[in-house]
Amino acid sequence: MRKKNKQGIFCISLDFELYWGIRDKKTVQEYGQNVEGAWRVVPKLLDLFKKYDVHATWAVVGAMVCENQKELFDVSPKIKPQYADENLSPYGQFYEEIHQIEAQYIFGKSLLKMVEKTPFQEIGTHTFSHYYCLEKGQNKASFLSDLSSALHILKKNNITAHSFIFPRHQHNPEYINEFKNYGITTYRGTEKIWYNSSSVGAEEGIVKRAVRYADYFLKMGSHHCQDITEVKQNGLYNIRASRWLRPYSKKLEKLDFLKMRRIKNQMTYAAKNGKIFQLWFHPHDIGSDIDKNFEYLDTIFEHYQYLKEKYRFKSLNFKEIKDYIDGNH
């Protein structure tokens, strides 16, 4: 039975980054199709959100909001991170060669405007440069410089961001302590289980990756749903991730049933027990095999509608969750 007076919450968050979030891992030649596909995904996704009355938070990389290369260089952070792994920084060779890359992979201001015009869509920040908060060589000064640039470019577009999503879930408690000084009130935390804890790439062991992989298809000890009383912490609102939407893969197609059952079971648990279930992904994740990936989303949102009618499951973005907590707790 659903706990009395506790209403479950369905939360969607998106890491909105175009090529900025993948440039240190894959070339445009390797991944450009997905990034290009994001230009089809975003309007299609917004239409789907309107159809099912889904509220979402879009955390945008500030660099992609720039109009062109000149504006990008003008608003870039004054203090740059000095990562031990130079490939992590866009400010060296990537900046020098950025004029050679098609604008659709780098700049997406018009996409952001589509999001802004759609009801119940919140725009937050995903840092300016897709900043890695736990990597060696960076520090608080360079992070705050990056955050300032991210908030500035949004302000130039008449957007004030209050929500933050850490790139690659590299949570840094020292930086979280600075959020209030920059108007950030909500952020996305990681699942409360050992194999989803924050770490840099070098710390990702094979066991951790294997268990996390299995968890996409089978319950590995937890539904990864959050009690609403756990969200507010030291004046900030930590809304934990529950599930990354794993995109379609031809090789794994036979596991689709398990993947969707896992997500629907998590949603049902949240609805029946008055918990928060947060689904997250990148628009470029579903930028190829778009029709297949949207079949997943249709299935998920149809299940949301069923749970909404049966258990009063409600869709809220980060800001709305904060407001809901402030008004009820």
Image: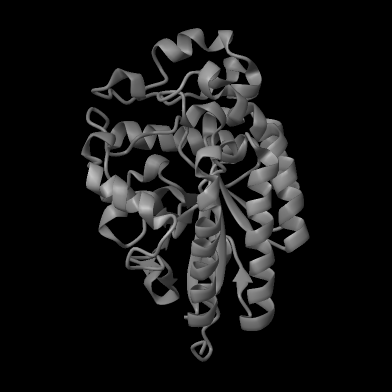
Left or right of residue 107, residue 125 in this image:
left
Residue 82 shows in this picture: yes
Image: 157 above or below 276: above
Residue 303 figure quarter: bottom right
Left or right of residue 285, residue 142 in this image:
left
Q: Residue at x 50, y 52 (%)?
A: 255
Image: 244 above or below 113: below
- Along the line of sight, the residue nearer the viewer: 85 or 207: 207
- Along the line of sight, the residue nearer the viewer: 129 or 47: 47
Q: Residue at x 57, y 43 (%)?
A: 248
Left or right of residue 59, residue 194 in this image:
left
- Along the line of sight, the residue nearer the viewer: 320 or 243: 243
Q: How is the image coloured?
A: one colour
Residue 177 shows in this picture: no
Residue 192, image x, y percentages: 32, 62
Residue 109, image x, y percentages: 66, 31
Residue 259, image x, y percentages: 51, 56
Residue 53 figure quarter: bottom right
Residue 310, image x, y percentages: 65, 82
Q: How many marks?
A: 0
